[in-house]
């Protein structure tokens, strides 16, 4: 079996059917380019036609492949500056270390993270430390996979409060064109999703979620059909909501 996905990517195929390509009232633009010296530039922007709010960011990335290093600089229209340094496959194969810092000149706020990820066959592990003046928060996640079956656990420990603030568990099954995902968050929120790739052009997904101690049950069904290599059409319906339909390019770009 290949390396299992990270905990955050469990059930991702179904989530993408529901969340991507439905940019009503939102115009997005992404541009990527690469210089002759190997520096990658990426800029993206979005405009909300209802609120007239415009967001954007600029990212530069340089990879020093010989030493497994990646340097990334980020700037957003919120005037937040970010620096990220990544070391991969140097200490041991499959291990990735990331040092991430952010600084906002307007407010003077600073933040930092140390991220570790270890990926090998049958296992995907991650531990992040989010530094804060009150005390660091430790985030951990693990996913194990065997013959298509997946099981994962995710937790957050707040050192300032000396208690566990998040405890999630997930189980799933994945094949080439079918995925089943179930999860329990903090023992109170339950969810599940099914993804099916019918053929090269048609993908479908079903999502169900409910919260213990309440009558709130959420159900959704969605489908995505690719009419041509650069065009797609989508449809989704949620319980107690009107159906939605949208179009978007199959390979990114402007979503209308």
Image (spheres, grey):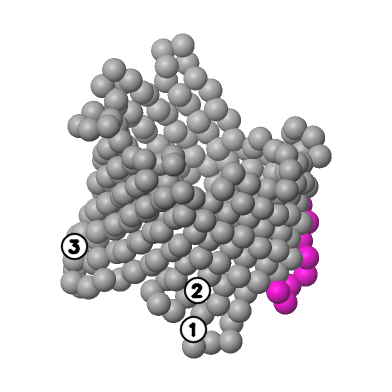
Q: Is residue 220 visible?
A: yes
Q: Residue 203 carries which label?
A: none
Q: In which quarter of the image is the N terminus?
A: top left
Closer to the eye: label 2 or 3: 2
**Which residue is drawn at the image coordinates 29% and 25% (left, top)?**
68
Estimate how packed mark 1 is, as few (under 14), some (14 to 19) or many (20 or more) residues with alpha carbons within 10 Å. Answer: few
Instruction: Name which residue lies at 44% across and 55% down.
Output: 150
- What residue is disc 1 on? 212
Q: Mark 2 points at which residue?
A: 190
Q: Which is more N-terminal, label 3 or label 2?
A: 3
Residue at image x 44%, y 63%?
Answer: 170
Inspect the magenta stretch and tell me whether residue 208 lies in it.
no
Work out whether 209 lies above or below 96.
below
Side (left or right) of 121 relative to 52: left
Q: Is mark 3 on a helix, strand or loop?
A: loop
Query: Do labels 2 and 1 touch, CB within 8 Å?
Result: yes
Q: Position of residue 242 (x, y in %)?
A: 77, 70
Label 3: few (<14), some (14–19) or many (≥20) C-alpha neighbours in 10 Å = few
User: Which residue is identified by label 3?
Assistant: 135
Q: Viewer-nearest of labels 3 and 1?
A: 1
Q: Which residue is nearer to you in this view: 30 or 176?
A: 176
Q: Where is residue 75 in the image (x, y as percent from the top left)?
A: 42, 38
Q: Position of residue 133 (x, y in %)?
A: 20, 60
First in sequence: mark 3 vs mark 1: 3
Task: Identify the residue at the far right of this view.
Answer: 227
Q: Position of residue 197 (x, y in %)?
A: 68, 48
For the residues labelled 2 and 1, the Cα–Cα distance comes to: 8 Å
Per the rendered image, the range of residues in magenta is 239-246
Which structural element holds mark 2? strand
**For residue 238, which quarter of the picture?**
bottom right
Relative to 227, residue 206 above or below: below
């Amino acid at each position: 079996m290949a390396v299992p996905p990270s905990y955050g990517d469990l059930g991702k195929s179904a989530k993408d059917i529901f969340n991507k390509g439905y940019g009503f009232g939102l115009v997005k633009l992404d541009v990527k380019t690469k210089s002759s010296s190997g520096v990658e530039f990426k800029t993206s922007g979005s405009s909300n036609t209802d609120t007239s709010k415009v967001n954007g960011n600029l990212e530069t990335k340089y990879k020093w492949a010989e030493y497994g290093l990646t340097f990334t600089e980020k700037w957003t229209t919120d005037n937040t500056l970010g620096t990220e340094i990544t070391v991969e496959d140097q200490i041991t194969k499959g291990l990735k270390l990331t040092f991430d810092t952010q600084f906002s000149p307007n407010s003077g706020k600073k933040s930092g993270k140390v991220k570790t990820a270890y990926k090998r066959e049958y296992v995907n592990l991650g531990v992040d430390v989010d530094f804060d003046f009150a005390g660091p928060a430790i985030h951990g996640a693990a996913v194990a996979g065997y013959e298509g079956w997946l099981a994962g656990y995710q937790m957050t420990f707040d050192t300032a409060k000396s208690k566990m603030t998040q405890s999630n568990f997930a189980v799933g099954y994945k094949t080439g064109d079918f995925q089943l995902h179930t999860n329990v968050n903090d023992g109170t929120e339950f969810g599940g999703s099914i993804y099916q790739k019918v053929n090269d052009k048609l993908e479908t997904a079903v999502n169900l979620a409910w919260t213990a101690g309440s009558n709130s049950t959420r159900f959704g069904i969605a489908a995505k059909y690719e009419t041509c290599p650069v065009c797609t059409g989508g449809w989704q319906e949620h319980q107690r909501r009107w159906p939605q339909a949208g179009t978007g390019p199959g390979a990114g770009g402007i979503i209308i």
